[in-house]
Structures are given as C-alpha cells and as structure tokens.
Amino acid sequence: MFYVWRRKKFLYRKIQQKFPTSKQIKGELLRSLETASIFAFLILSIYTLNTLGLARLYTDIHAYSIGYFVFSIVALIFIHDTYFYWMHYGMHRIKGLQKIHAVHHYSHNPTPFTSLSFHPIESVLEFAIVPIVIMVMPMHPIALVLFGLWSLAWNIIGHLGYELFPKNFVKHPILKWFNTSTHHNLHHKRSNCNYGLYFNFWDRLMGTNHKQYERIFQEIKAR
C-alpha cells in the first residue's frame, strides 16, 4: 500500500521524505524471518511450560469471568509496555546490549519490515516477559493471540514511516498518551530518545521524549 501500490499518493504523509534502499529492505526481511522463527519456538516453549505445570494457561473460557479475560489482555499490554521501555532504554545505555540493538538501528529510515528486524538475542529479550507473566497470571490462549495482534499492529504502525494519526492527536488530553509513527521514527533517526512502544507514559515521566516531538508531528500533519 505505502511502498509500492500507493507510494506517490501517500508521499505527503511520509515522515522522512526519502525511501530506504532495497538493500536495507532485503536485510530487514531476512532478519524478520529469523525473528519470526525464534518467536514461534518461544510460543511452543510456553505450551511446554504448561505441560510441565509451570505455566497458568487455561482453555475453558468459563474457568474465569469474561471480565477477567479482558483484564488479562489489558494487564499484559501495560506490563509489556513497561518492560519494553526499560529493556529498550537499557539497550541504549549498557555497552554489551548496544551492539546487539545496533542491528535494529541499521534502519535509520524504518519500514514495516523493520518491526521484526532484530539480532537473535534481542528477539528473545523482546518476548521474554510473556512466559514470565504466564507463569504468574492465568491466561487464555485467545487472550495471547489478541495481545500478539495488538503488539504487532502497534509495532508496524511505529515503523511504518508514514504518519496516519489525525492533526491534533498529540494535543488531545487522552490520545496524546498513545505513541505515533512520528514518535518512533524520531527514535530511529536520532536514537537517544523516544523509547516507549505503545504508550507515552514512561517517556513523559522520565523526560526521554524528543524535545521537538510535538512540533515535528504538527509540521508533518501541516502537509
């Protein structure tokens, strides 16, 4: 849609007004296939943990209330967002992890394929919080699938390279707490800011938002 079919139509929404090289995209595709394989292995490991009695997966939807089912998804999203911020922040501060995370930052001008373009160790770290949560909190497999779809969707939005959110999104009293494509694109371009994934809580609290984030967002929307 954005990089081939309607490329010219949506150009005015492109955050960085240039396109990445085919070499970058090919590299992202290969690393994404590797990450997807690692994620698949880790998902299977959850079921292994469950058969060993170490995880708290349940398959009867009535074992807990529908309210708990919804709560478990929301809780996992917020837990993952907090974990991601501090894990991501550490990868930019701890020397050994910086080299690992540098693989993801080969993409200074991110594309949707950047979403899963990680070093294998980072792939494991990205997923690591999920089995830990499942060992503590009961989770239905469908809740995990819905969480996975949410996570992948926001990951793709963050790396899309196009700003799709409406003009006053970053000024809205509620919506400003969600991250935008511009927010994560600035992270790839500048590297030392904007560490959050889904929400803008931790970046605001810790003062790690790019100082000109809102102004740059408004400039892009002014096109």
Image (tube, helix red, strand yellow):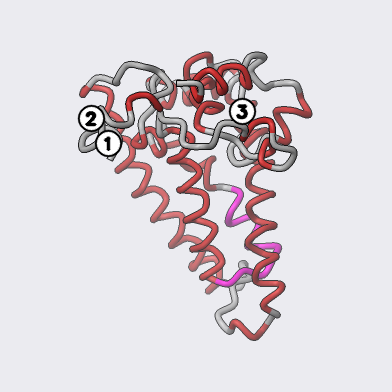
| Label 3 or label 1, whichever comes before in sequence order | 1
| Label 3 or label 2, whichever comes before in sequence order | 2
Q: Are marks 2 and 1 in contact (CB under 8 Å)?
A: yes
Which of the two residues, 165 or 80, is positioned nearer the viewer here? 165
Q: Position of residue 213 (x, y in %)?
A: 61, 20
Q: Report the Cα–Cα distance between label 3 and label 1.
A: 23 Å
Q: Report the Cα–Cα distance between label 2 and label 1.
A: 5 Å
Farthest right residue? Answer: 205
Amino acid carrying label 3: it is Tyr
Q: Residue at x 68, y 49 (%)?
A: 78
Residue at the spot of label 2:
26
Q: Are marks 3 and 1 in contact (CB under 8 Å)?
A: no
Residue at the spot of label 1:
29
Q: Residue at x 69, y 36 (%)?
A: 172
Q: Report the Cα–Cα distance between label 3 and label 2.
A: 25 Å
Q: Are marks 3 and 2 in contact (CB under 8 Å)?
A: no
Give the magenta range. 129-140
Q: Quadrant of the C terminus?
A: top left
